[in-house]
Amino acid sequence: MATEADTNPYNDDFEWPSTLYREMRDISTVAFFIYQFGYLIDAARDESEPLVGVTTNEANKINNKVGDYGRSFTPAEVKSLIQDNRKRLKSYGKEFNNKNVEILNIILDKLQARADEFPDMERPLVVEAYDDLHQKKECVYGIVRDSTNKRLTLCFRGTNKLSLVKNWLSNVSILKEKVEIPDMLKGKVSEDNLNFHSGFYNYLFKETEDESDEKGTTKYDQILEDLKELTVKYPDHKVYVTGHSLGAALSGLCSFFLACEPDLPKPISCINFASPRFGGEIYYESSQYLEKTKQLRMLRSVNDNDSIASVPSVGYYHGGISCTMEKNGWFFKAGKPSIEYRKMGSRWWSKLSYDLSQSAWTSLNIGYDHGDYISRIKLHKEELEKYNFNKLYADEDLTGFKLEDK
């Protein structure tokens, strides 16, 4: 039976979710919500055919800094916007076809039902920030505050039609960017420089496009400023980071650097979906140091034979714990989720076996469906409820290390 130290090894009074299923379910729904929210706001900016319930001016203000962006949105308010503008949104594109709206309505109803369980809280579950102002050249992110679970969830949008060219230029740009290691990691790992996938790294760390920003400001700087302001306002909330595909790579990269920030509550929790690889060997070593010292928790949700999650291959590594879920196993029954971790101290043949299981050769599938990840989590509910995220990190047989204070 799990001990209290196993289920909460982080020496805090935070009420962590009891099962891995609950954490994956909650974060996947928020990620899908933000993905669709972006399309809704984009539609609202069309002055020629405005939406009922949100003005063009309000939609444009969404990109202002936290606390000054016009208005926040509850799940019920977002659902009302969709229902009141159903005909208009159908003409916007397949993003609001019957299937996607049905999934989104289920998610919104569940999120609002959770918020309604806390009548004494004022607007306990809202979109606090959203920035897609320069989406054709910059990454897009949103921050959802869930005070019912005391979470601030940073969501990165993945590849989509609104910035398709830039998204794919970032995806296919596989040259490495050499980066000086954060101060807190100096002397803790074997080298002083890190290598990252240049497309993903520059998407997050290149100078912003907005001329009103101070020179040298990056998207990461803006995200960090938003999170610092929100964690001061909500000091008992933990920071989660998520995304799908391109958004998953950005979430992993960003969570790594957020875990090195002294002013944010730890650990930073990253749960993402279909993440490509984005870091070199010293990133892999550094990430494990952050996990071992309770600064970072990372779970990569991977569908079986998902090609996106297996590239780029040569010289790049995945971080965190992987959870691979099949759709159909023997006799068309879903097999058990595969929980794996690439240990630092493993023998070469163990690492080779792990790398092959995560390689493009064993993942030949070009499927690209965010909603399918939500379906897989639901399909594997019974098995995922047997796991606890914190207990996985407390399992030395899985990780190869014992958790310790920094």
Image (tube, rainbow, N blue to C red):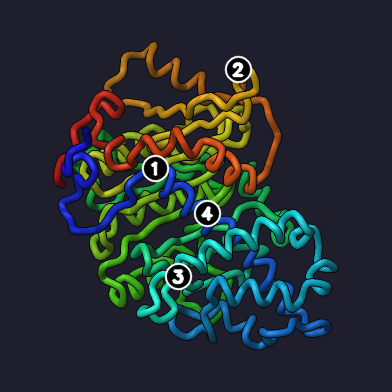
Looking at the image, is 182 positioned above or below residue 234?
above
Please give the name of the residue rendered at 31% of the width and 47% of the height, measured from the top-left corner: 296
Q: Which of 165 and 132 is in front in this view?
A: 132
Give the secondary structure at mark 3: helix
Residue 210 found in image quarter: bottom right
Q: Which of 23 and 41 is in front in this view?
A: 23
Query: In whole angstroms, how far apart are the C-alphas of marks 4 and 3?
Result: 37 Å
Q: Name the residue under label 1.
A: 20
Query: In whole angstroms, how far apart are the C-alphas of marks 2 and 1?
Result: 24 Å
Please give the name of the residue rendered at 53% of the width and 75% of the height, measured from the top-left corner: 74
Q: Which of 137 and 371 is in front in this view?
A: 371
Residue type marked 4: Asn
Q: Can residue 222 be seen in this view?
A: no
Looking at the image, is 256 positioned above or below residue 74?
above
Using the image, tell me which numbered label, if any, was put on residue 339: none
- Name the mark nearer the viewer: 1 or 3: 3
